[in-house]
Image (tube, rainbow, N blue to C red):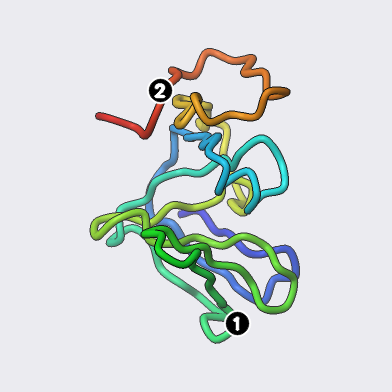
Amino acid sequence: MLNGQCNCGAVSFEIAMDLTDIYICHCSICRKWSGTNGIAVTIVPNDRFRWVSGQDRIASWQKPGADWQSWFCRDCGSALPGNNDDQAMFVPAGLVLGETGNLKVAHHIWVDSSADWDQIGDDGKQHSKGFQA
């Protein structure tokens, strides 16, 4: 069992599985959301994810006309887990607490959209657009 929380601790969650893969999205939306070269997330099936506290502290924002939505803590502004699709949640990797020694960057997505200054320096597989299994 892994736990996670936002920066202030108001929102917390549990993950009932071991995590191994990190996906780093380099698209312009994720760069703006994170304020850096992208956002590192893990993908967790819905039946392995549970909110523990603070669901009333979760706010969201959606760019008009976009199919993507961001979730964040109303109190501290930390990025929070959100719906990846109907089957799974994306979980910002930096929120996960506990034993994460098995985690590694496995995929870089939307590399064609990366910032000019972004240099990918690990063995993660690079995908020009989104992840294709």
The residue depicted at 52 percent of the width and 63 percent of the height is 70
The relative height of residue 25 versus residue 3 in the rendered view (above or below) is above
Q: Which residue is mark 2?
A: 127
The residue depicted at 62 percent of the width and 60 percent of the height is 79
Going from the N terminus, do you reach mark 2 or mark 1 first?
A: 1
Outermost residue to the front: 65
The relative height of residue 33 versus residue 54 in the rendered view (above or below) is above
Expressed as whole percent of the image width and height from the top left, the position of residue 64 reads: 46, 67
Q: Nearer the viewer, residue 16 or 75?
A: 75
Q: Is residue 62 left or right of residue 85?
A: right
The residue depicted at 42 percent of the width and 23 percent of the height is 128
What is the C-alpha distance between the residues marked 2 and 1? 34 Å
Q: Is residue 13 left or right of residue 118?
A: left
Expressed as whole percent of the image width and height from the top left, the position of residue 56 reads: 54, 86
- Toward which corner of the image does residue 93 lie, by quadrant? top right
| The disc label shown at residue 90, or none | none
Expressed as whole percent of the image width and height from the top left, the position of residue 96 reads: 58, 51
Expressed as whole percent of the image width and height from the top left, the position of residue 39 reads: 59, 42
- Toward which corner of the image does residue 10 lie, by quadrant? bottom right
What element does badge 2 sit on?
Answer: loop
The relative height of residue 80 versus residue 99 in the rendered view (above or below) is below
Q: Nearer the viewer, residue 111 or 2?
A: 111
Q: Is residue 95 left or right of residue 124?
A: right
Give the residue type that dot 1 points to.
Arg
Q: Which residue is mark 1?
A: 57
